[in-house]
Amino acid sequence: MGEQQKTLAEEVVELLKVDELTVTTAESCTGGLVAARLVDVPGVSEVFKQGFITYSNKAKRKLLNVKKTTLKEFGAVSEKTAREMAKGAILASGADAAIATTGIAGPDGGTEEKPVGLVYIGVSVRGQMYVEEHHFEGDRSEVRESTVQAALALLKKGLEETDGNDQDH
């Protein structure tokens, strides 16, 4: 076999293994795609704890402890909800890191304020929180696929930044 470029998921799993960290996922708009991408990587069982697919607000509240007031005031698709989903996933699973995704994949559900393609990704690594807002283009599956890639990239960034060997810290 020639030199194959590692996928983002493979890079993330490798970083988790090196740092001896575990990860969990809390997904809404991606419906388990982030977890599936991680599970595609051989050996992920060493680092992947569990995944939560919390599509409804009720599931976000019940499984991830997202506050009812957060959902009412800011909506399911918000920075605050992504943050609370990631935090809740850590608490519920005992993992060291979490990826949370919430957004509007389309084709319906968008508004002028929150258009189709609006996605928030929350990542928590060792207590450090990272949240990004994205505006993805394309159809439902393209928005979801873009979200998976951005979520894995944000987790990779979080893992690299919180690494004990990082010169910045």
Image (cartoon, rainbow, N blue to C red):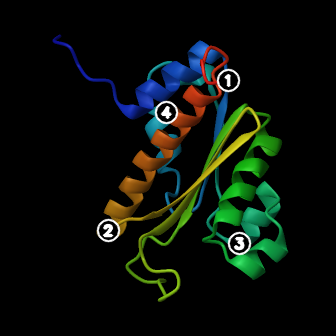
Q: Please report contact status of discs 4 and 1: CB closer than 8 Å, yes or no.
A: no
Circle 2 sits on which residue? 137
Furthest residue toward bottom: 112
Q: Where does the image place residue 129, in percent across and percent down from the top left? A: 69, 45
Look at label 3 and name its amino acid.
Answer: Asn
**What is the crowding at mark 3: few (fewer than 14 residues within 10 Å), some, or many (at least 20)?**
some
71 or 38: nearer the viewer:
71
**Whole-Å distance between the Cαs marked 3 and 1?**
37 Å
Q: Secondary structure at mark 1?
A: loop
Q: Is residue 11 above or below residue 34?
A: above
**N-terminal-most mark, 2 or 1:** 2
**Whole-Å distance between the Cαs marked 2 and 4?**
26 Å
Q: How many marks?
A: 4
Look at label 4 and name its amino acid.
Answer: Val
Quarter holding the C terminus is: top right
**N-terminal-most mark, 3 or 1:** 3
Look at label 1 and name its amino acid.
Answer: His
**What is the crowding at mark 2: few (fewer than 14 residues within 10 Å), some, or many (at least 20)?**
few
Residue drawn at point x = 74 percent, y = 47 percent: 89
Q: Secondary structure at mark 2?
A: loop
Q: Is residue 103 above or below residue 18?
A: below
**Whole-Å distance between the Cαs marked 4 and 1?**
31 Å
User: Which numbered dot is residue 39?
Assistant: 4
Q: Secondary structure at mark 3?
A: helix
